[in-house]
Image (cartoon, rainbow, N blue to C red):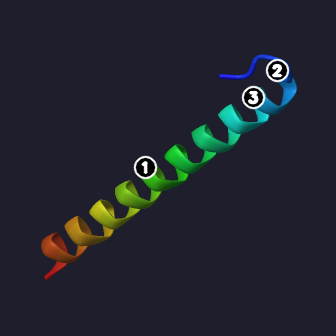
Amino acid sequence: MNEARPRGQKTRLWISWLVVSVLLGYGVVQTVITAAKLFTS
């Protein structure tokens, strides 16, 4: 772990959080779509 550049570290943290939230959001959307298909059919 290199603490010389905290700004780069913070950017990396933001990017990882962004990826996690996008993946979670995608999973939730897929679940909602599947549930909607099950309930409507």
From the image, tell me which residue sits under label 1. Answer: 24
Q: Give the quarter of the figure containing the N terminus.
A: top right
Q: How far apart are marks 3 and 2 (CA)?
A: 5 Å
Answer with mark 2 or mark 1, whichever residue precedes in sequence: 2
Above or below, 24 relative to 8: below
**Residue 37 screen position, x and y as percent:** 22, 77
Mark 2 nearby-residue class (10 Å; few <14, some 14–19, many ≥20)? few
Q: Give the quarter of the figure containing the C terminus.
A: bottom left
**Residue at position x 43%, y 49% from top?**
24
Give the residue type at disc 2: Pro
Verify CB contact (< 8 Å) between mark 3 and mark 2: yes
Give the residue type at disc 1: Leu
Q: Please give left or right for residue 32 compared with residue 37 in the image.
A: right
- Please state which of the two labelled residues, at mark 3 or mark 1, is closer to the viewer: 3
Mark 2 residue element: helix
From the image, tell me which residue sits under label 2. Answer: 6
Q: Which of 30 and 35 is in front in this view?
A: 30
Above or below, 29 relative to 8: below
Q: Quadrant of residue 7?
A: top right
From the image, tell me which residue sits under label 3. Answer: 9
**Residue 33 screen position, x and y as percent:** 31, 70
Q: Nearer the viewer, residue 25 or 20?
A: 20
**Residue 26 screen position, x and y as percent:** 44, 60
Verify CB contact (< 8 Å) between mark 3 and mark 1: no
